[in-house]
Image (cartoon, rainbow, N blue to C red):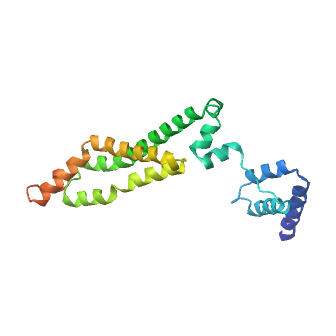
Amino acid sequence: MRSQESEDLRAYRDKLQAYTTEELEDIYFRVHVLRHPLRYNLVRRELESRSLRPQPPREMAIRRDGLRSWLAARPALTCRPLLFALVFAMLLFTITAAAAFLLLLPIWLFAMPLHFLGFETALVYLVCAPVPPILAAGLGGKLGGRGIYGVFVLMGVVAGLLLFNATGAPSAIIQSAFRHATGGGGPSFGGF
């Protein structure tokens, strides 16, 4: 059985040597690393022996490079740099604002509809509250919001925080914490 596998791998290696560079790159991006680790290594070695660094297909490159490269693939925006900058900044702002708001929604869910309020839960909310803005800012950075565009990422995070504040959850949490801390409140969790 072992000799059959080694013969198959030798035949596969010989086949790889006959392929063109484009065919070899195509195989490199299509071979399943977990199902066929030996074949993947053979393809990688063949690429290295040819001193090649495979370039990912366009759809893979867009995901890796972020929002900027996705927009750069749009012909209407590439020939108008000012429009490109405006659209890119507005998308960064919108995405980071939505991310910050959506990541803060679990706090609203527990505080408002489920009535998990009180001094102890306010401390938990206080500890958890910085995480969503940090994650949203990180997302904006991953999408390409660096340099001057970092200002739009920051404004998006602030807008998400302001939207969350408009839900009334922060004031309800603070009021319940003070009420329970001064002894004027009943049991925690809204009377459950």
In screen coordinates, is 43 left or right of 121? right
In screen coordinates, is 98 left or right of 128? right
Count all numbered tags in the image, as a single digit.
0
Q: 86 above or below 155?
A: above
Quadrant for the N terminus, please. Answer: bottom right
Q: Which residue is drawn at 88% across and 50% down?
A: 20
Q: Residue at x 65, y 37 (%)?
A: 73
Which is nearer the eye, 47 or 155? 155
Q: Can residue 114 be seen in this view?
A: no
Q: Residue at x 13, y 60 (%)?
A: 181
Report which quarter residue 46 is drawn in.
bottom right
Q: Which residue lies furthest to the top in this view?
A: 76
Q: Position of residue 74 (x, y in %)?
A: 63, 33
Q: Where is residue 75 in the image (x, y as percent from the top left)?
A: 66, 31
Q: Can residue 173 be seen in this view?
A: yes
Which is nearer the eye, 134 or 115? 134
Q: 34 above or below 105?
A: below
Q: Position of residue 25 (x, y in %)?
A: 79, 51
Q: Residue furthest bottom?
A: 2
Which is nearer the eye, 122 or 148? 148
In screen coordinates, is 72 left or right of 123? right
Q: Position of residue 42 (x, y in %)?
A: 81, 62
